[in-house]
Amino acid sequence: MKTLAISVQEREKVGKKNTRALRNQGNVPCVLYGGEKQVTFYAHENDFRKLVYTRDTFLVKLNINGKETRAVMQDIQFHPVTDKILHIDFLEIFDDKPVTVSLPVILEGIAKGVKNGGNLLFRRPKIITKGLVSNLPDAIKLNIEDLSIGMFLYIRDINIQGCEFLAPPNSVVVGVKTARAAIEEVVEEDDSEESSDAAPSDAPSSDAASSDAASSDAAPSAE
């Protein structure tokens, strides 16, 4: 996994009043759990931008008062109006304990079906994955060049050693579906072909029928 180092300050005081004061100064209150004890700390909101506003998932090296602790972001709260970061939860990680993270999916190549007029259907840009930190990749890379129209890749088609995907095996990750415009175009072509290929009627035309009637009237009587 990609790593990101952030220097933070341990909180000496907790409570609503202290939390409000930190936020007014542009800081983000945080909690680290999963280790021997829960640790509360804070850092300026700008220090978390690379961690929060990205598709990447990071192994975070928190420098808490000079002591480095490895963690992953587990939860984040935003202000409902301003969208500012209000709070972040971190989980301390260890080499021998599996961790659950949301890994980004990166598509490689251009699907054959897209080149033929189909639409790409990208259902899971991230997949919740469980495994030891040493086994977790930066991202899940999928080559989609061989996907034709009507073909899909499912969770069950992905195999990364040492990783478990916490999603139903039959969940679609990516695929190529038929474009509506392409369907309509085919239908229109079929209709035009049916009109042009229609067999001529055996019944005489109205002109021919009128001509035959006139000839019959003009014929001399058998008498």
Image: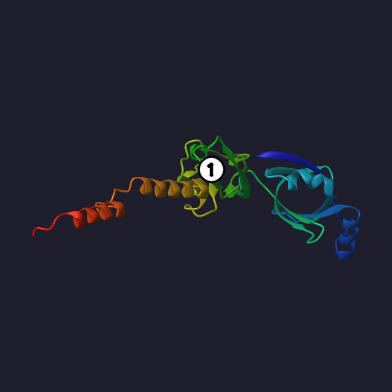
Residue placed most toward the observer, 9 or 77: 77
Q: How did the renderer colour the structure? A: rainbow
Question: Vertically, is 28 above or below 15?
Answer: above
Residue 36 position by quadrant: bottom right
Rendering coords of residue 184 (x, y %): 48, 50
Residue 8 in sight here = no
- The quarter of the picture where the C terminus appears is bottom left
Question: Where residue 192 sits in the image (x, y, percent)?
Answer: 41, 47
Q: Is residue 125 left or right of residue 218?
A: right
The residue type indicated by label 1 comes to Gly
45 sits to left or right of 127: right
| In-front residue for pair 34/137 | 137
Give the tally of numbered discs. 1
Residue at 20% in and 57% down? 217
Residue occupying image coordinates x 30% and y 52%: 207
Tag 1: Cα neighbours inside 10 Å, few (<14), some, or many (≥20)? few
In the rendered view, tell whether residue 216 sits above or below residue 119.
Answer: below
Instruction: Residue at the far left: name it.
Output: 223
- Quarter the N terminus occupies: top right
Residue on which the image places disc 1: 162
Q: Position of residue 14 (x, y in %)?
A: 85, 61
Asked whether residue 222 appears in the rendered view, the answer is yes
Q: Secondary structure at mark 1?
A: loop
In the image, residue 134 sits, relative to residue 74, either above or below, namely above
Q: Nearer the viewer, residue 127 or 189?
A: 189
Position of residue 168 measured from the top left corner of the image (x, y, whole percent): 50, 55
Is residue 172 toward the left or the right of residue 94 in the image?
left
The front one of 20 and 80 is: 80
